[in-house]
Amino acid sequence: MRLINQRLSRPAILALKLAPFALVIIAYLVGSAVRLADNPADKLLPAFASMADAIDLMAFTADRRTGDYLLWTDTWASLKRLGAGLGISTALALCIGVAIGIFPVARALLGPFIGFVSMVPPLALLPVLFIMLGLGETSKIALIVIGVAPIMIRDLSQRVLDLPREQIVKAETLSASSWLIAWRVVLPQVLPRLLISLRLQLGPAFLFLIAAEAISSDSGLGYRIFLVRRYLSMDIIFPYVAWITFLAATADFGLDRLRRWLFPWSQMEGGT
Amino acid sequence: MIITRRIATKTLSTLVVLGGSLLAAPAVAQDRTEFNVAWSIYVGWMPWGYADDTGIVDRWADRYGITINVTQFNDYVESINQYTAGGYDAVTVTNMDALSIPAAGGVDTTAVIVGDFSAGNDAVFLKDGESLADIAGRPVNLVEFSVSHYLLARALDSVDLSERDVSVINTADPDMVGAFQTSDVTALVTWNPMVSEIATLPDAVQVFDSSMIPGEIIDLMVANTEVLQENPDFGKALAGIWYETAALMTADTPEGAEARAAMGAASGTDQAGYEAQMAATELFADPSDAVAFTASPEMGSTMDLVRAFLFDKGLLTPGASSFDAIGIALPDDTILGDPENVKFRFTTEFMQMAADDAL
C-alpha cells in the first residue's frame, strides 16, 4: 500500500497528535532531572513542582509590595495594549484598505505609500517612538499599529481588487452609486477576510507588544518576562510563555468562530 | 499501524536520549587546561578586553600551561546567565548580582578579584528638583532589581523615605539617555556611561550618587568555586592578568595613556571620557589595597545591606524565609547566613599572591 493511502484508526491519529507534545515534555523532564541531580538549585530547567509554586506565587498570592495578583494585572495591562493596538489597526485596515481597493484617487494617493511604510522594520523605529511619544502607553500601542496595520491594509485592498470586475459592473447597471457599491457589494465580501487577516496578525502583534514592554513598563506579560530574566527565573518564564501561547491560541480560535458565526457563507467559499 | 507505533517508540527513545544529553551539557572535567571567561562593557571591566587584545591574557595562561578564552558580551545579564548555566568558568559581575543570580541559582561562586568599587559611576537624577527629598511621589525610571535599584533604596533611606513613596518604572539601560529627554520622565537612576551623558543635559540635577555610599557597589571577577579549587592555576592566571593590566592602565606613561585611549574607544568614548569614568571609580591597581578592602569588616556590613535588599525584593531564592537563606563566606572564614548553604565566597588568596609577588 502506498503511504499516501494509509488509513489510520482513530486511536492512532490521537496518539500521533499527542506524540510531539509528549516528546517535548519528556525531553524537558529528563534534562531537568539531570541538571537538578547535579545542582538542586538549578534555575535553567526547573522541575514542574517549582513551576507550580511560581504559578501559585504569581497568580494566586497577593504581591507583598503592592497587594496585586501579578499574573492578572500583567495580563490585563498587556491585553489592554494589544486590544487597543489591534482595534485601531483593524479600523484603519477597513477604512483605508477598502478605499484603496475601490477609489482610484485613494489608490494613487495611498497605495504606494502604504506599500512603502509596510516595509519599515517597526522595531528599528522603537527608539524614535519612545522619544516622540514618551515612554507611556501611547508609544506601545503605536508600535503595534505601525507593525500590524500596513500589512492588514495591503491585504484587504488586494482582496478588494481581486473581486470580480463583473460584480461591480453589474451593480452599476442596476444604477448603484459608488458608496452603495462599497457598502453593499464590497464590504460584505471583504469583512470575513478582515477577521482572517486579524487572526494572522496576532503573532506579530504579541511580538511588538513584548518588545515595547521590555523597554519601559511597570506591568505587562513582556515586562515580567524581561524583568525576571535578570534572575534567570525560568520557573516564572516558562509558565508565562505558556500563558501567552494560550491567550494567543484562544484569540485565534475565537476570531475564527466569530467569522463563521457572522459570515457563515465565507466558510463555503473555502475561506481558509 | 503497528509499524507506526514501533517507529514512534523508537523515535521517542532516541529523542529522549538526545534531549537528555543536550540539556545536561555542563560537567566539570578533571585536569582541565581550557577555561572560558565572560566580560561585559563597563569602566571597571574594560581591562579584561584590553588584556585579551594585547596578549596579556595569553602570556599569563602560557605561564601556567593553560588556555583562557575571553569573550565579550554586549548584554551584561546574559553573560551572568551564561555563567550560571555553566557555559563559562568566570564572569565579571557586581557583588549584588553575584549573590542574586549565580549564588541564588545554586552555583557556588568565589570572588577571585575585587577590582574596584563605584564612587560616582551610579547616580540619581531629577528634573525640576533641588535635592533628593523632591523625589517623593514621582515615577522613577531605572533597571529594576539592578544596582540602580539598590542605589535608589539606599538614597531613599538617607532621607527617611521608602520605595512606597515613589513608583518604579523598569526601563532598559540603553534607552536611559533618550528617556530622560522625554517629558514624562522626571526622575531616573542609572550607571556610566549613561551618567556622564545625562549629566551634560541642561535640566538634569544629580541629587545622589554612589560616592555617598562608598564601597557598597563592588565590581568583581568571580569564578566557579569547584573549578577554582580543582585548578588554582586558573585563579593565579586571572590575578596575574588583572594586576599587570591595572598597573599599566593607571601608569602616568605614554603606554598608560595609550591603554586608556584603547579602553575608551572600546567602550564608545575616548581617552578623556574614559578617564572621567575612572575618576568615579575606586580602582584597586595595587593588590594590597584590594586585600585590605576585601578583608575589612565593612565588607561584611555591605553584604548584610545587600542581602537584606535582595530578600526584601524576593530575589534571594523563591522560598527563602529570611535573608540567611544563602551563606556568604568572608575572607576570615566568618559566615553570614546559612553555614550549610554557602554559595558565595570572598577570598584574598589570589590577590595576596599578587601582593607578595608569588604568582
Image: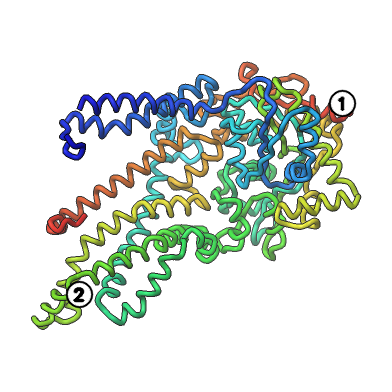
Residue B358's disc is 1
Q: Chain of mark 1?
A: B
Classify 10 Å Cα crowding around label 1: few (below 14), some (14-19), many (20 and above). few
**Can you give x and y, in whole percent of width and height, for residue A97 in the image?**
29, 70
Residue at 49% across / 29% down in the picture? Answer: B23
Q: Which residue lies most toward the top here?
A: B340
Please state which amino acid type lies under the numbered disc 2. Ala
Q: Residue at x 68, y 30 (%)?
A: B34
Q: Is residue B49 above or below residue A255?
A: above
List the residue tagged with mark 2. Answer: A182
- The three-letter amino acid code for the residue at tag 1 is Ala
Q: Farthest front residue?
A: A1
Q: Quadrant of the N terminus of chain A?
A: top left
**Tag 2, which chain?**
A
Q: Mark 1: which secondary structure?
A: loop
Give the total of numbered labels.
2
Nearest the camera: B92 or B151? B92
Please name whichever residue, B334 or B227, is drawn nearer the observer in this view of the structure.
Answer: B227
Q: Is residue B211 visible to us here? A: no
**Cα gap from disc 2 to disc 1, whole angstroms:** 87 Å
